[in-house]
């Protein structure tokens, strides 16, 4: 695992001009289309192009995307996102979980998330686990259709039960466990209208089985929170939209370059977080500081198997 690098990207909201049918207008998509009239000037194609260039220039080993590739959950958007992902990097180097905009309304799987199977590789089962050089990427699907004006998420009992089993199994194998989802797990990270409905149930699983790091989006600002684990606090990192101009609602486009290191004498791994921020003046992503995190020490952490089943 030492030296393995990950890019954390979120909420790219790929620009897409909706052509809604009369039936589609009688749904939450119409509200999103009205919102897009205000926000289309913020999610810029030139920022997305610069993001792709910067991800390639920084030579990360794996790209983690925590949802909201689309805006309206239209079939054409899922196809557009699949094409964007295919051009970004080889599929085995990308892991994707959906966000609330990717489940704005119910979409037949064949026209929606099935198109992202190369980047979820989940066989229609959530959460997935992708193993990369001693790291287990565990991807949760917190996205579900909700009533108008709500952007809440939910995992459900089946997903949480499978998560508990995966966390225990990956720990026993000596893997460093990174949990990915769209909605924040930490209390007060976001308002009730946009929160994870079963956040407390997720935190109970993490408190019992642990994880080394949680990554999410959805909050529009960069955040470092924590939830309780069995061997110390589990850091929860959020990036804002990776495609938005700075504005009163968004901190501005950003992504995190995560460099993982094996444990020292106490067995605890660590991660260095480099902030890559969109510079309006330079019209490019630039380094904007960083910080190091000591990750919680798993009970059976070790070198583990050097597995990669991508």
Image (cartoon, grey):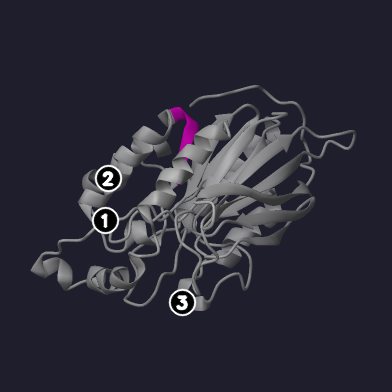
Name the side, left or right, on which 172 lies relative to 14: right
Name the side, left or right, on which 265 lies relative to 277: right
Residue 134, how many percent across, how many down? 65, 29
Q: Are marks 3 and 1 in contact (CB under 8 Å)?
A: no
Which element carries disc 1, helix, strand or loop? loop
Q: Which residue is nearer to you in this view: 35 or 266?
A: 35
Q: Which residue is nearer to you in this view: 36 or 81?
A: 36
Name the side, left or right, on which 261 lies relative to 157: right
Q: Give the CA distance from mark 3 to mark 2.
A: 28 Å
Q: Is 277 rendered above or below residue 51?
A: below
Q: Which residue is nearer to you in this view: 225 or 199?
A: 225
Q: Are marks 1 and 2 in contact (CB under 8 Å)?
A: yes
> What is the number of the mark on residue 193?
3
Q: Quadrant of residue 114?
A: top left
Give the residues drawn in magenta, as a range: 92-96
Q: Are marks 3 and 2 in contact (CB under 8 Å)?
A: no
Residue 215 visible somewhere in the drawing: yes
Is 94 contained in the magenta span? yes
Quarter of the figure with the N terminus: top right
Q: Is 291 rendered above or below residue 121?
A: below
Q: Give the CA distance from mark 1 to mark 2.
A: 9 Å
Residue positioned most to the front: 281
Instruction: Report which residue position mark 1 lands on.
Output: 16
Residue 108 visible somewhere in the drawing: no
Instruction: Report which residue position mark 2 lands on.
Output: 80
Which element carries disc 3, helix, strand or loop? helix
Residue positioned most to the left: 22
């Amino acid at each position: 695992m030492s030296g393995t690098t990950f890019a954390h990207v979120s909420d790219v909201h790929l620009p897409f001009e909706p052509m809604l049918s009369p039936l589609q207008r009688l749904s939450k998509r119409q509200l999103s289309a009205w919102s897009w009239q205000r926000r289309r000037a913020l999610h810029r194609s030139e920022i997305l192009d610069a993001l792709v260039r910067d991800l390639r220039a920084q030579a990360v080993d794996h790209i983690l995307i925590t949802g909201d590739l689309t805006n309206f959950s239209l079939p054409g958007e899922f196809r557009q996102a699949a094409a964007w992902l295919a051009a970004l990097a080889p599929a085995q180097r990308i892991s994707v979980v959906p966000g609330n905009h990717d489940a704005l309304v119910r979409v037949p799987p064949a026209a929606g998330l099935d198109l992202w199977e190369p980047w979820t590789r989940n066989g229609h089962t959530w959460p997935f686990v992708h193993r990369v050089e001693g790291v287990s990427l565990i991807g949760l699907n917190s996205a579900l259709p909700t009533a108008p004006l709500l952007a809440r998420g939910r995992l459900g009992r089946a997903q949480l039960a499978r998560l508990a089993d995966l966390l225990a199994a990956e720990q026993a194998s000596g893997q460093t466990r990174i949990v990915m989802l769209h909605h924040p797990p930490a209390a007060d990270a976001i308002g009730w209208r946009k929160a994870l409905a079963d956040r407390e149930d997720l935190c109970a699983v993490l408190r019992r089985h642990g994880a080394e790091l949680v990554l999410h989006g959805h909050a529009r600002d960069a955040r470092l929170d924590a939830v309780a684990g069995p061997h110390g606090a589990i850091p929860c990192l959020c990036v804002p939209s990776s495609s938005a101009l700075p504005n009163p609602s968004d901190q501005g486009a950003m992504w995190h370059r995560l460099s993982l290191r094996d444990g020292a004498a106490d067995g605890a791994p660590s991660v260095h977080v480099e902030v890559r921020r969109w510079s309006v003046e330079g019209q490019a992503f630039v380094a904007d500081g960083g910080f190091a995190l000591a990750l919680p020490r798993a009970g059976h952490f070790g070198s583990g198997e050097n597995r990669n089943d991508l």
